[in-house]
Image (spheres, grey):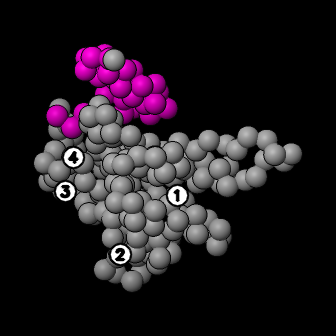
């Protein structure tokens, strides 16, 4: 049986490996995160994430407003607490789910999706997806895949944190929002799961 310090070291090592793909953010931590730009809402967002670190969030704002940095700081906090979680860009998440849906010719082994492992196996799993607006529902299959992902998270009462350059719903009908990019049904699931934080 591993002692708590060995478990924590294992989790830290695993996070370090995962964040190799996110080098710019590998040192992001909720405890030390400070607003680094004059971004409206960033101080409030940091306070919210520190107070309710385990909750689900949609973090929206313009380019370079700190969305990904905040999301990865939350991911690190939750992963270090020992909660099963997975971190993906929207494009990588879509590709992973697409590969998991394919049937191998000749009855070969199916692709093991870490996202599906969290959805199907974790009691309190958390899925993190960066730039969800980069996964537009251009096809019915893609929209169905996203709906199934978020619907499963909602039904199983798991947690979800996503970032987007666009708000869930724009007050100005001339501006783009996630309802128009991902489709009404997908945006409705995000709305049911996540609290929106605007930077």
The CA span between labels 3 and 4 is 20 Å
- For the residues marked 4 and 1, what is the alpha-carbon distance in whole angstroms? 25 Å
Q: Is residue 130 visible?
A: no
Residue shown at the point (68%, 49%) measured from the top left: 99
| Numbered range of the magenta stretch | 2-31
Closer to the chain start, of discs 4 and 1, is 4
Does label 1 or label 3 sit earlier along the sequence?
3
Q: Residues within 10 Å of mark 4 (few under 14, many from 20)?
A: some
Q: Identify the mark at residue 76; answer none if there is no mark.
A: none
Residue beneath label 1, please? Answer: 134
Label 2 environment density (alpha carbons within 10 Å; few <14, some 14–19, many ≥20): some
The majority secondary structure of the magenta stretch comes to: helix
Q: Residue at x 76, y 52 (%)?
A: 103
Q: Secondary structure at mark 4?
A: loop
Q: Position of residue 125 (x, y in %)?
A: 37, 47
The reply to whether the C-beta atoms of the residues labelled 2 and 3 are less than 8 Å apart is no
Looking at the picture, tell me which residue is in the foreground, 141 or 197.
Answer: 141
> Which mark sits nearer the N-terminus, 4 or 2?
4
> Front-most of 175 and 85?
85
> Can residue 55 be seen from the camera position used here?
yes
Report the Cα–Cα distance between label 4 and label 2: 24 Å
Q: Earlier in the sequence, mark 2 or mark 3?
A: 3
Quadrant of residue 4 within the rendered picture: top left
């Amino acid at each position: 049986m591993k002692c708590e310090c060995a478990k924590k070291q294992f989790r830290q090592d695993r996070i370090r490996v995962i964040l190799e793909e996110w080098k710019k953010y590998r040192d992001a931590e909720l405890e030390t995160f400070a607003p680094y730009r004059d971004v409206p809402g960033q101080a409030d967002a940091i306070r919210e994430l520190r107070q309710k670190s385990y909750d689900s969030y949609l973090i929206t704002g313009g380019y370079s407003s700190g969305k990904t940095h905040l999301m990865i700081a939350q991911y690190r906090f939750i992963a270090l607490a020992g909660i099963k979680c997975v971190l993906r860009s929207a494009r990588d998440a879509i590709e992973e789910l697409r590969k998991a849906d394919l049937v191998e010719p000749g009855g070969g082994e199916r692709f093991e999706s870490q996202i599906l492992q969290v959805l199907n196996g974790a009691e309190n799993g958390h899925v993190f997806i960066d730039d969800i607006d980069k996964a537009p529902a251009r096809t019915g299959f893609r929209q169905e895949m996203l709906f199934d992902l978020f619907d499963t998270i909602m039904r199983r009462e798991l947690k979800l944190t996503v970032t987007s350059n666009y708000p869930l719903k724009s007050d100005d009908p001339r501006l783009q929002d996630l309802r128009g990019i991902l489709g009404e049904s997908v945006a409705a699931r995000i709305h049911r799961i996540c609290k929106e934080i605007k930077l």
